[in-house]
Amino acid sequence: MNTWRRLLLAVVCGVAVASIYAAQPVLEPMGRDLGVPAELTGWIVATGQIGYLAGLLLLVPLGDVVDTRRLIAVHLAVTAAGMIVTASASSAWQAFVGLAAAGLFAVVVQTTVAYAASASPPAERGRTIGVVTTGVVIGILGARIVTGALADVWGWRSVYVVLAALSLALAALVLAVLPPETRTSPVAGYRQVIGSLGGLFGQRAFLTHGLIAFFLFASFGTLWSGLSLPLADAPWQLNESQIGLFGIAGLAGALGAARAGQWADAGRAAPVSGLAIALLVLSWVAIAQLPWSLGLLIIGIVVLDFAVQVVHVSNQHVLTASHPDRVSSVIGGYMVFYSLGSALGAATTTAVFTAYGWAGSSLLGAGFATCALVVSVVGRHAHHLGFRGPAEHVGGAASGPSPRPRPEPEADIPTP
């Protein structure tokens, strides 16, 4: 896969994921306009995550059944429709319907990652996943910068109009630029793919990577879904554009981890991932200083986003290398944990902040990060004791490239 196609896929991921996270820096005006109580504004983001969860289970596995290129285009078009509904909403329930629909089909992100992994030679898979996944993080954090600026000038609804237009343009570009997918073996049926997805959740290594992702993104969501509330409050009292600029710090951290895919290709995914989880825990010490120091907050944000990106890329590299015959299903199943964790962080951080202030939110985020570290350590211990299934390598638990798995009866799906 050439550089331009990697970049196109990264942009697709960035725009699609932005549809879920665009509300984060404008929760207050969006909630006020739609009549959502302050303590429930976190559900504006969580609603998209719930739709995303359903899409991971029902839509992403379609990538193992049909032409992934066309699937990407269709999902982008329907995501655009959901954003148009949100932009035109006159009540909270209409906005929630639009957000849920956009979230459901925003799983085009994972279909795109699976396409990128399948279309790349094994020696370059980590690099490709790293580039494309960086687009995801840029979309999550860059949305904050763009959303804040647009909201200040034209209001929060303009954000969803712009994202809808970009999604439609990318759908046309994907069909024009990406080659049709070629399959060298018969395609499995949808029911067979969905059935095999359930079998993944019975594998210890898959569950370990998934639980790490769950707590990883619960910590991530705690920061980014709750950050606008204390920054808009005393003593800082920043506006939407100023709050959105903090996304630059997150982008710096994410881009700093751009080599994570190359580290994974070189067989260093596990030790680097373990170190990154430890850094995630430490980042909350600096983030907790928000009421007194924006400088320390920025340092904490950079470290947190660096850590999240490293672990996330490493996890996907290990799992796709271990299951090359069902990449879409593996990515979809793994991202269920991501979606649940992000929704948990988004839904709880606003309630905790309302009750206990930023100190409470910081303890919540640090607690989620600590849980990820515990899961990693327990997984490493189990690995050393020999409790491992086929191709089981746990972030922070093993080193070296992931071997091919032994055939598994419940996962007998032909290679795309």
Image (cartoon, rainbow, N blue to C red):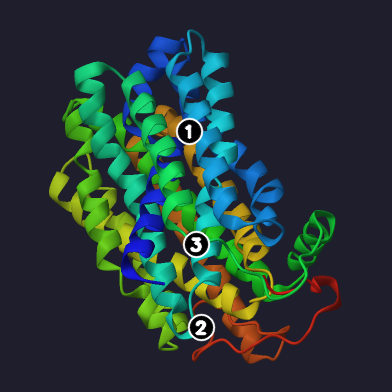
Q: Name the residue under label 1.
A: 45
| Label 3 element class | loop
Q: Nearer the viewer, mark 2 or mark 3?
A: 3
Residue 355 picture location, percent across and down: 44, 29
Mark 2 or 1, nearer chain start? 1
Q: Which residue is drawn at 64% across and 49% down?
A: 56
Pointers 2 and 1 in contact (CB under 8 A)? no
Compared to residue 275, the image places residue 165 above or below, namely above
Q: Residues within 10 Å of mark 3 (few under 14, many from 20)?
A: few
| Total marks in image | 3
Disc 1 to disc 3, C-alpha distance: 34 Å
Is 351 on the left-hand or right-hand side of 289? right
92 and 364: which is toward the camera = 92
Quadrant, the C terminus:
bottom right
Question: Disc 2 residue type?
Answer: Pro
Identify the disc placed on residue 22: none
| Label 2 element class | helix
- Residue 157 visible somewhere in the drawing: yes
Mark 1 or 3, nearer chain start? 1
Compared to residue 334, the image places residue 397 above or below, namely below
Question: Disc 1 residue type?
Answer: Val
Q: Mark 3 points at which residue?
A: 179
Q: Nearer the viewer, mark 1 or mark 3?
A: 3
Pointers 2 and 3 in contact (CB under 8 A)? no
Disc 2 to disc 1, C-alpha distance: 36 Å
Is 335 on the left-hand or right-hand side of 27? right
Q: Residue at x 84, y 55 (%)?
A: 191
Q: Mark 2 points at which residue?
A: 122
